[in-house]
């Protein structure tokens, strides 16, 4: 299992956060998504044998957001 925090500066409301949390169901290998519109970031725990970071970032982009890895 791996964990990554991703900045999502264009997440503005609870609906945005809920939309991103759907990745738990839609992307095989994603275990949990904790998205916070107040902090404008999301933490993803995932199984790197099933999904990679680029796939996760791509899925976030497909939902209409601009993900950036935190430093």
Image (cartoon, helix red, strand yellow):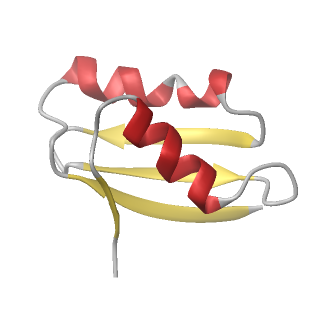
Is 1 left or right of 66, judged from the image as shown? right
What residue do we see at 31% from left, 29% from top?
A: 17
**Which residue is farthest bottom?**
71
Please provide percent x and percent y for residue 68.
32, 63
Q: Where is 3 relative to 58, above or below? A: below
Q: Quadrant of residue 34?
A: top left
What residue do we see at 78% from left, 60% from top?
A: 48
Is 66 left or right of 57, judged from the image as shown? left
Q: Quadrant of residue 11?
A: top left
Q: Where is 20 relative to 7, above or below? A: above
Q: Nearer the viewer, residue 50 or 42?
A: 50
Is 30 left or right of 1, judged from the image as shown? left
Please provide percent x and percent y for residue 18.
37, 21
Q: Nearer the viewer, residue 67 or 37?
A: 67
Please provide percent x and percent y for residue 71.
34, 82
Please provide percent x and percent y for residue 24.
62, 30
Is 44 left or right of 8, judged from the image as shown? right
What residue do we see at 61% from left, 60% from top?
A: 53
Q: Quadrant of the N terminus?
A: bottom right
């Amino acid at each position: 299992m791996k964990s990554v925090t991703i900045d999502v500066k264009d997440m503005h409301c609870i609906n945005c956060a809920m939309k991103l949390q759907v990745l738990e169901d839609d992307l095989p290998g994603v275990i949990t998504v904790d998205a916070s519109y107040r902090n404008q970031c999301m933490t993803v725990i995932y199984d790197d044998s099933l999904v990679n970071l680029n796939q996760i970032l791509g899925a976030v982009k497909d939902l209409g957001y601009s993900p950036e890895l935190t430093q």
